[in-house]
Amino acid sequence: MRRLILPLTVAVALTAAPATTAHAGPAAPDLGRAVLADGDGWGSAGAGTTGGSTAAPENVFRVSTLEEFRDAVAGDTPKIVLVEGTVDANTAPDGTPIACEDYAVGGYTLEGYLAAYDPEVWGWEDPTGPLEDARAASQDVQAEQIRVRVGSNTTVLGADDDAGLAGMNLLVHDVDNVILRNLTLSDTYDCFPGWDPGDGGSGNWNSEYDHVEVSGATNVWVDHNTFDDGDNPGSALPEYFGRKYEVHDGLLDIVRAADLVTVSWNDFVERDKAMLLGNSDGRTTDRGTLRVTYHHNHFDGLGQRAPRVRYGQVHVYNNHYTVRGDLFQYSLGVGVESHVYAENNVFDLHDGIGAEEILYNWGGDDIVEHGNAVMRDGRGRLTTVDLVEAYNTANPGLELGTGATWDPEFAVGVEPVHAVRGLPREVGAGLL
């Protein structure tokens, strides 16, 4: 099978020496030992988020390969992991890129899968049989390669402006006290998406891996990172069975009772399903958790889920939304038992998209919003808008309420909305 998805170019740093105990240069120790400030979002609550700031000198690592990175972030001892260059997860220990066909087992080929499960041939039942089993087994092989688990009390920091993780499914699962900063997290692609003929009424291709998944974790700070698809944007993906062959899942999903998270000063670029907060309407065990703050992020050309919220108390303030493109469906999704407080965000509307399209009701009750403003096509004055009123007027029968169910407590530094206008120039990796 020819390779359909190409990973990012492997950085020269992949051939660097193995990770060793190191003293970073003058600037790196300060950034590596930085902690989330008091009052800076939900991540500062509870025990606070300090990451690996107390790491002993022997637990400060410089890494440039997948194996070095995987070893360095493991375990719960306080540690600082400084990433040099691009660590590409689809790379063998000798630096050789791993192609999609290298993961395939059981006779799987995309051509064979498409021929077998074409609805005109197979019908509209779920795929079953040897080729579906081979697809799932091949997916497991890739998962073993690209999934990396981060331990508690860890700071992962880009050591330079070009540092990043490519093709990696970074898991912050059931741990505490993690900081991710100054990284470009790019193109976490699934070589083996599955066809679900019942998804959305006309079927969809579903992929497996998020760039970062925070699950069951507490006190996490995600700051000054860039999330994108690198050289593999969704707009360039082919269609099969009349649907986009989607090889990407979320950029940053926060799920399964994760709690006390601050997401700040990041650039999220051109993804359809961008950020899920809570992954099931029926997961009532999420009640009382999923407390997350999103502030000073640029949501650039996202299709939906910026974020989509279930359950938790979620503060969304001083973010800049560049709303554009064919992917767009909505920005803020108000889901089951969600408690969203959105204030002083800028929505730069392009392509004829209206203010009434910014919100979407996914079975939620209330969203408190104030001070939000829109502009058109990147120019002109900001105009304050009542997002709930705009949505309700356009969607009779699906109205949202405006009850004040809670007041954000951890919200130092909320700025006037006009201060957010130039935010896209100030966010993402390389700007610390």
Image (cartoon, rainbow, N blue to C red):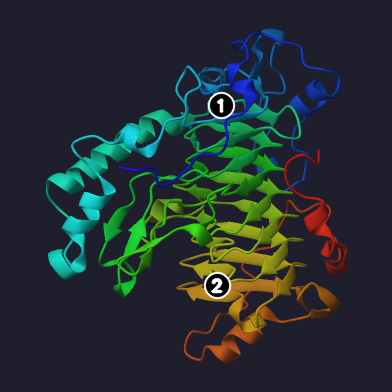
- Residue at the disc numbered 1: 152
Confirm or deny contact between disc 1 and disc 2 (CB under 8 A). Answer: no
* Residue at (75, 29) in percent of width and height: 160
Three-letter amino acid code of the residue under disc 2: Asp
State the image coordinates of residue 79 (x, y, percent, origin top left): 64, 19
Displayed quadrant of residue 420: bottom right
Q: Residue furthest left?
A: 129
Drawn side of residue 167 relative to residue 39, left or right: left
Q: Disc 1 to disc 2, how far (Cα)?
A: 39 Å
Above or below residue 370? Residue 420 is above
Quadrant the N terminus occupies: top left
Drawn side of residue 359 relative to residue 127, left or right: right
Q: Secondary structure at mark 2?
A: loop
Nearer to me, 166 or 319 = 166
Query: Is disc 2 surrounded by few (<14), some (14 to 19) or many (20+) residues within 10 Å?
Result: few
- Residue at the disc numbered 2: 326
Drawn side of residue 263 relative to residue 130, left or right: right
Three-letter amino acid code of the residue under disc 1: Ser
State the image coordinates of residue 196 (x, y, percent, origin top left): 27, 61
State the image coordinates of residue 155 (x, y, percent, origin top left): 66, 28
Query: Is disc 1 surrounded by few (<14), some (14 to 19) or many (20+) residues within 10 Å?
Result: many
